[in-house]
Amino acid sequence: MRLSCQRRPPRAHSLAAALAAALIVASASAAAETDPETDPESGFVIAEGWETVKGNCTVCHSAKLVTQNSGSRAHWADLIVWMQETQGLWQFNPEMEATILDYLATHYGPRTDARRQNLPKRLMPPTPNSADEQGGTASDST
Ligand code: HEC
């Protein structure tokens, strides 16, 4: 009669499982480090100044309009002036404007993989509708 002494140590399986779990946890946190954390509500990258930007830049339009744009600090500064002059955007004190511009230029800076930037609205030709307002066609006046 043989003694059954061939049982494997019960630990082997659970050790392998623990190692696998540790690897999964490690790779998940590595992924989290490369993607910047974003605000689930607005999509803004969470970094210094984001709450100021969210508070001021989502009042009239969606945050997407902001996050889908990109450009240099000067581009953002131009855009803010354009909204202040034509769209009723309020003035910012210098510190607040610096906070906003630093944030935008850092997290929504010029992209090298994109097409050239859109022309600012003020450099665009008039639309057909605004041409209409300047007078009808010649045949109207007969
Ligand atoms: C007082 C209202 C108002 C506020 C506040 C406002 N905007 Fe705008 N913004 C507008 C309007 C109006 C448009 C034109 C929307 C359109 O074309 O449909 C616009 C357009 C834009 C565009 C698109 C420009 C383009 O080239 O099409 C961007 C980017 C933008 N805003 C960024 C911002 C940022 C950044 C802030 C915060 C500093 C901000 N907006 C705050 C009114 C506002």
Image: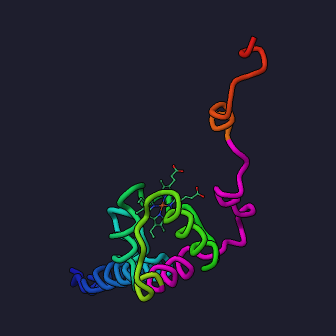
- Establish if 84 lies above or below 51: above
Q: Nearer the viewer, residue 126 or 73?
A: 126
- Establish if 23 lies above or below 60: below
* Image quarter of the C terminus: top right
Magenta segment: 98-126
Left or right, 51 with respect to 139, comes to left
Q: Measuring from the top left, give residue 3's x and y in whole percent.
A: 21, 84
Q: Measuring from the top left, give residue 33's x and y in whole percent.
A: 45, 83
Q: Measuring from the top left, give residue 46's x and y in whole percent.
A: 39, 78
Residue 105 colored magenta? Answer: yes
Left or right, 3 with respect to 116, comes to left
State the residue lying farthest toward the front. 142
Q: Which residue is rendered at x = 32% and y = 62% of the image?
A: 41
Q: Nearer the viewer, residue 138 or 114?
A: 138
* Image quarter of the N terminus: bottom left
Q: Nearer the viewer, residue 82 or 68?
A: 82
Left or right, 4 with respect to 24, comes to left
- Establish if 58 lies above or below 29: above
Left or right, 104 with respect to 62, comes to right
Count of numbered circles in the view:
0
Q: Which residue is rendered at x = 49% and y = 65% of the image?
A: 84
Q: Which residue is rendered at x = 24% and y = 83% of the image?
A: 10
- Establish if 48 lies above or below 132: below
Is residue 47 among what the camera can see?
no
Render colour scheme = rainbow
State the residue lying farthest toward the right. 138
Residue 58 colored magenta? Answer: no
Q: Measuring from the top left, give residue 29's x and y in whole percent.
A: 40, 81
Is residue 126 among what the camera can see?
yes
Question: Residue 40, located in which quarter of the rendered image?
Answer: bottom left
